[in-house]
Amino acid sequence: MGTMLYAKGIPLHRCFDELNLSAPQLVKEVHLGYVRAGAELIETNTFGANRYRLGKFDLAEKVREINLAGARLAREVAGEEIYVAGSVGPLDIRLEPLGPTSLEEARAAFREQIVALVEGGVDLIIIETMSSMEEAHQALLAARDVASLPVIVQITVGEDGSTPSGARPEDFARHLDAWGADLIGVNCSLGPAIVLETLERMAAVTTKKLTAQPNAGLPQMIGGRSLYLCSPEYMAGYAQRFIEAGARLVGGCCGTTPEHIRAMKTAVRALTPRGGRISVENPPRSVQALPPVNVESRSRLGAKLAQGEFPLIVEMTPPKGWDAARELEGAVYLRGQGVDAVNLPDGYGSTVRMSAQSLAVLILQKTGLEPVLHFSCRGRNLQSLQSDLLGAYAVGLRNIHAVTGEVPPFATLPAGTTVFDIDSVGLVNVLSNLNRGLDAGGHPLGAQTAFLIGVGLNPYALNLDEELRRFRYKVEAGANFALLRPVFDVNRVRVFLQRLQESGIPRIPLLGNIYPLTSFRSAEFMNNEMSVPVPAAFLERMRKVDTGDRARAEGVKIAQELLLEMRELVQGIQIAAPFGRYALAVEVAQVLGTVPRADAARPGLTAEV
């Protein structure tokens, strides 16, 4: 449907499902093309007609209207001789535990769509292009809630036959069989060859009738248009092989034109399906999560937290460009001053900088100081996110601070884009799975990681109920420690910590966060633009000294006062090093009595290091 509407001039940024209302004749023309080619079943133009996908076009309130129209348009063309399948695609969101949408919310969204399709007169429901087994299950449950119509459930797979979440054909075939789908199969994917291989593996573990609707190959950009290059003859040849492998419903997905369907119909017309299929014994995999490694064994930082010591961390911003000599010199200096770790922000601001992960590896390998890697969900899909984490573990990184990541402001990269497959809650779940030897889909990896997992906690959040709710999810998912936002108002933090204690959220170590002010302007900036409250008394003290050495000295004095107050409230501390002045952070920490005095610094290092 999408291919044909695109060929008729509908741009890709349009909502194709809405055309059921604004261009019904165009949709009917597409249906009619497939009917004339010999299709015995057509699908409604409702693949993305759920409230989440329609919401991206401000059409969430038109779910019933669009689905009802889609079903009736297909029914008018099909008449009584041809079956109409109500097309139900994925919600295009992440479900718990990797996203904020609950399973019941997903089921309700599918139910809302399917109710309208049934009312519109479809003969069956086809749940298709599913990459998440849990989402497929919720869609199937919703279909069963609504009516007793037959339900097809189809999964989409990658080049190895597994879903993007890692489920093998044998796994999802068994699940769909057990959940009670009437037909199960594969659609979309990379093309006919992969679908055939997947179908053969499914056939070995299920007696359900199978379906196959591959793409017509991978799309290619030719002359500015997206085209699928598998010929009708090629697709027809595979249609025969699908039937020989056990399929009883064959067709096509993206790129499959009426010409493809006509050739497939001719190829399979004389084919007589075999009467039965032998089910090959293929026992299910035993998916056993490994017990996580003890926190004290994951890293030196983990050991300090587990033993009730008070670790000292300094924040270090990655450099602009590729030269990290200054940061490495700073790491050597900080280690000599008794600092336990450096915390490396990921994607700091909108300036192009060395990746935090690369700097973390350099620091660990060249200085021995332990890094805490800010790991952001921004710019990574779920697969690349897991790949990067496994790579980080392989090169020795053990401490991860899980953050959602912010959308970069319009600055040096005005055309930059972002990807957010999951948020920080989902990332903690991914890390916990890796620590148990499983991928995000719960499938065994063969070996486990031992990451120490940190998360953020904001005592100044505008909606504290929401902040605590998300923090509970992170702790329950497996967070090992939390880092507070920079602190200037200790009384406000005390009130927040009391509320945290009353919430019943399981206790994990909390690390305070101290930012030494360097000028009156920096104090104003924190207070007004970073939403970090700075008490009026501190603002007045910084106003009197304004800028220069006196301002930096006053900022250190304030930071030391805050550190002494926070010492009794938290289980560790992070100190920022404004503008890369690592000696400034060390000077603040000296009030604890656990680091050498400034004059004991390694010779040759200035206060700017």
Image (cartoon, rainbow, N blue to C red):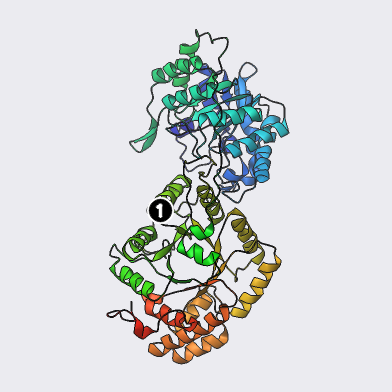
**In the image, is 587 to the left or to the right of 506?**
left
Q: Position of residue 377 (x, y in %)?
A: 48, 54
Q: Which residue is mark 1?
A: 392
> Whole-percent x and y of residue 64?
67, 39
Which class describes the residues within 10 Å of circle 1: few (<14), some (14-19), or many (20+)?
many
Question: Which quarter of the figure has residue 464?
Answer: bottom right
Residue 506 shows up from this direction = yes
Q: Is residue 123 above or below residue 438?
A: above
Residue closest to the eye, 132 or 167 = 167
Q: Count of labels shown?
A: 1
Residue name at image x 48 percent, y 18 percent: 242
46 left or right of 217? Answer: right
Does residue 103 sit above or below 589 in this rendering? above
Residue 517: in sight, yes or no?
A: no
Left or right of 531 on screen, residue 393: left
Picture quadrant where residue 184 is located = top right
Residue at the (45%, 40%) spot, across then down = 11
